[in-house]
Image (cartoon, rainbow, N blue to C red):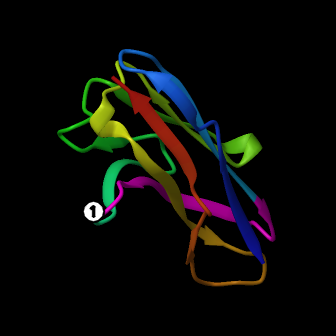
Amino acid sequence: QVQLVESGGGLVQAGGSLRLSCAASGNIFDISDVGWHRQAPGKQRESVAAITNTGSTNYAIAVKGRFTASRDNAKNTVYLQMDSLKPEDTGVYYCNAKVRSHQAIWYSNYWGQGTQVTVSS
Protein backbone atom coordinates (compact mmCIF):
# COMPACT_ATOMS: atom_id res chain seq x y z
CA GLN A 1 0.00 0.00 0.00
CA VAL A 2 1.16 3.52 -0.85
CA GLN A 3 0.08 6.77 0.75
CA LEU A 4 0.52 10.30 -0.57
CA VAL A 5 0.22 13.15 1.91
CA GLU A 6 0.14 16.78 0.87
CA SER A 7 1.08 19.54 3.28
CA GLY A 8 2.03 23.20 3.27
CA GLY A 9 -1.27 24.76 2.34
CA GLY A 10 -2.71 27.72 4.18
CA LEU A 11 -3.94 31.29 3.96
CA VAL A 12 -1.72 33.83 2.25
CA GLN A 13 -2.15 37.32 0.86
CA ALA A 14 -1.95 37.98 -2.84
CA GLY A 15 1.65 38.24 -3.92
CA GLY A 16 2.79 35.85 -1.24
CA SER A 17 4.31 32.39 -1.47
CA LEU A 18 3.63 28.89 -0.27
CA ARG A 19 5.53 25.66 -0.65
CA LEU A 20 3.51 22.48 -0.90
CA SER A 21 4.93 19.05 -0.23
CA CYS A 22 3.72 15.67 -1.42
CA ALA A 23 5.29 12.88 0.59
CA ALA A 24 4.94 9.28 -0.48
CA SER A 25 5.26 6.39 1.94
CA GLY A 26 4.61 2.69 2.07
CA ASN A 27 5.59 -0.09 -0.29
CA ILE A 28 7.58 1.95 -2.81
CA PHE A 29 10.10 0.64 -5.31
CA ASP A 30 10.01 3.57 -7.70
CA ILE A 31 8.06 6.78 -8.28
CA SER A 32 7.62 7.90 -11.85
CA ASP A 33 5.68 10.97 -12.93
CA VAL A 34 4.07 13.18 -10.30
CA GLY A 35 1.39 15.73 -10.97
CA TRP A 36 -0.04 18.65 -9.06
CA HIS A 37 -3.69 19.55 -9.54
CA ARG A 38 -6.13 21.95 -7.99
CA GLN A 39 -9.85 22.30 -7.63
CA ALA A 40 -11.54 25.58 -6.89
CA PRO A 41 -15.05 25.66 -5.41
CA GLY A 42 -17.61 24.92 -8.07
CA LYS A 43 -14.98 24.15 -10.69
CA GLN A 44 -13.47 21.04 -12.16
CA ARG A 45 -10.10 19.79 -11.05
CA GLU A 46 -7.31 21.10 -13.26
CA SER A 47 -3.70 20.13 -13.69
CA VAL A 48 -1.17 22.80 -12.78
CA ALA A 49 2.22 21.11 -12.90
CA ALA A 50 3.94 17.82 -13.56
CA ILE A 51 7.41 16.48 -12.96
CA THR A 52 8.98 13.34 -14.36
CA ASN A 53 11.33 11.01 -12.52
CA THR A 54 14.26 12.77 -14.19
CA GLY A 55 13.09 16.21 -13.12
CA SER A 56 11.57 17.48 -16.35
CA THR A 57 8.65 19.77 -15.65
CA ASN A 58 5.55 21.11 -17.35
CA TYR A 59 3.20 23.81 -16.18
CA ALA A 60 -0.23 25.10 -16.96
CA ILE A 61 -0.19 28.45 -18.68
CA ALA A 62 -1.95 30.05 -15.70
CA VAL A 63 0.93 29.23 -13.34
CA LYS A 64 3.95 29.19 -15.62
CA GLY A 65 6.66 31.47 -14.32
CA ARG A 66 5.14 31.54 -10.83
CA PHE A 67 5.08 27.88 -9.76
CA THR A 68 8.05 25.54 -9.64
CA ALA A 69 7.88 21.78 -9.16
CA SER A 70 10.84 19.87 -7.79
CA ARG A 71 11.50 16.50 -6.21
CA ASP A 72 13.77 14.81 -3.72
CA ASN A 73 13.85 11.19 -4.79
CA ALA A 74 15.77 10.15 -1.68
CA LYS A 75 12.88 11.40 0.45
CA ASN A 76 10.11 10.27 -1.93
CA THR A 77 8.85 13.83 -1.80
CA VAL A 78 7.76 16.28 -4.47
CA TYR A 79 7.40 20.00 -3.90
CA LEU A 80 5.45 22.81 -5.48
CA GLN A 81 6.86 26.25 -4.82
CA MET A 82 4.16 28.81 -5.47
CA ASP A 83 5.18 32.45 -5.78
CA SER A 84 3.30 35.61 -6.71
CA LEU A 85 0.08 33.95 -5.65
CA LYS A 86 -3.20 35.33 -6.90
CA PRO A 87 -6.74 34.97 -5.50
CA GLU A 88 -7.58 32.76 -8.48
CA ASP A 89 -4.99 30.27 -7.24
CA THR A 90 -7.31 29.45 -4.36
CA GLY A 91 -8.40 25.84 -4.17
CA VAL A 92 -7.61 22.40 -2.85
CA TYR A 93 -4.29 21.18 -4.21
CA TYR A 94 -3.76 17.50 -4.85
CA CYS A 95 -0.79 15.47 -5.94
CA ASN A 96 -0.89 12.21 -7.81
CA ALA A 97 1.94 9.85 -8.51
CA LYS A 98 2.65 6.77 -10.54
CA VAL A 99 4.25 4.35 -8.12
CA ARG A 100 5.70 0.92 -8.59
CA SER A 101 5.67 -1.22 -5.47
CA HIS A 102 8.11 -3.96 -4.63
CA GLN A 103 7.16 -7.27 -6.26
CA ALA A 104 5.06 -5.32 -8.78
CA ILE A 105 5.74 -5.17 -12.50
CA TRP A 106 3.55 -2.18 -13.22
CA TYR A 107 2.96 1.33 -11.92
CA SER A 108 -0.25 2.29 -10.14
CA ASN A 109 -1.70 5.77 -9.81
CA TYR A 110 -2.21 7.21 -6.34
CA TRP A 111 -3.76 10.44 -5.09
CA GLY A 112 -3.29 12.42 -1.92
CA GLN A 113 -6.11 13.83 0.17
CA GLY A 114 -5.42 17.44 -0.77
CA THR A 115 -4.35 20.58 1.01
CA GLN A 116 -6.27 23.87 1.04
CA VAL A 117 -4.67 26.98 -0.40
CA THR A 118 -6.48 30.27 0.10
CA VAL A 119 -5.16 33.50 -1.39
CA SER A 120 -6.77 36.68 -0.14
CA SER A 121 -6.89 39.87 -2.15
Identify the residue at image location x=35%, y=54%. Answer: 40
Which quadrant holds residue 44?
bottom left
Q: Position of residue 115 (x, y in %)?
A: 58, 49
Provide residue 15's location: percent of width, then percent of height: 36, 15
Residues 77 and 88: in front is 88
Is the magenta region chiefly helix, strand or loop? Answer: strand
Q: Quadrant of residue 104?
A: bottom right
In the image, residue 67 above or below residue 97: above
Name the residue nearer the viewer: 54 or 40: 40
| Disc 1 element | loop
Asked if the magenta segment contains residue 37, the reply would be: yes
Crowd band around label 1 with a 10 angstrom C-alpha radius: few (<14), some (14–19), many (20+): few
User: How many numbered marks are there?
Assistant: 1
Query: Magenta segment, which residues?
Result: 25-42
- Relative to residue 106, is residue 121 depicted above or below? above
- Mark 1: which amino acid? Lys
> Residue 18: percent from the left, percent from the top?
53, 26
Residue drawn at 25 percent across, 32 percent down = 64
| 8 within the magenta span | no
- The picture quadrant where one finds residue 30 is bottom right
Along the line of sight, the residue nearer the viewer: 53 or 98: 98
Q: Which residue is nearer to you in this view: 43 or 21? A: 43
User: The C terminus is located in which quarter?
Assistant: top left
